Amino acid sequence: MNNKLIVLFLLAIGLVGYDWYYNQPSRRAKMNAQDETNNALRADLATAIQARDKVGGLKQDIEQTNRTINQLLNRLPMRSEAGTLLEQITTVKKGIRFESITPGEIVSKTIKVKISQPPVSGTVTYEQLELALNMIATFRELGKYLDNIEKIPRLVEVVGLKMTSSGAGKPMTVKMTVKTYIYGGR
């Protein structure tokens, strides 16, 4: 019986040795390959989690950008509002007398827009209307008028101002050029 146990023990040691020598290297190679695959998947998962976490912030950035664009578009008059804007520019309470108001031609302009984060580019087309205003006003009333123009909810830019005095205490002759920008063809 001892001989049988010794033979069985030697046979078991031989089988374990055979397995260790011939089969173990291929199992190790498969395990190493699986570990590399698992590590790559973990890295991909970490990247996906980071991207998911950034999506919420990007959505908020997009919403904020859309709100800003809408606010800016609200400051640009539409073509149908140009008459109302002209009325706002030329309406004064007292102290200013308009000698002439000469609208220029409506000039169409296209600009390229490029945003770096996230990378977006495109073009924006708008129209530019220039008005030449000739008026008679005192210095104080001209200051009030310019303050009122600044308070107009639409985008109006004073691009030229020339004042000529006709003497102390007398109203001045004022030549002013204003620009407004029209968005869209409505």
Image: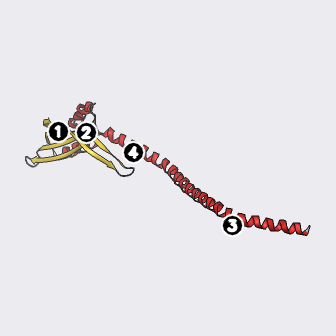
Tell which tag, 1 or 4, sits nearer the viewer: 4
* Quarter in which the C terminus is drawn: top left
Report the Cα–Cα distance between label 2 and label 4.
19 Å
Residue 69 percent coordinates (x, y)? 36, 42
Tell which tag, 2 or 3, sits nearer the viewer: 3
* Residue for badge 3: 21
The kind of residue on which mark 1 rests is Leu
Residue 8 in sight here: yes
* Quarter in which the N terminus is drawn: bottom right
Tell which tag, 3 or 1, sits nearer the viewer: 3
Report the Cα–Cα distance between label 1 and label 4.
31 Å
- Check the image and report above or below for 160 versus 100: below
* Residue for badge 4: 65
Residue 111 percent coordinates (x, y)? 25, 44
The kind of residue on which mark 4 rests is Thr
Mark 4 or mark 3, which is nearer the start of the sequence? 3
* Residue for badge 1: 131
* Residue for badge 2: 126
Tell which tag, 2 or 1, sits nearer the viewer: 2
Mark 1 or mark 3, which is nearer the start of the sequence? 3
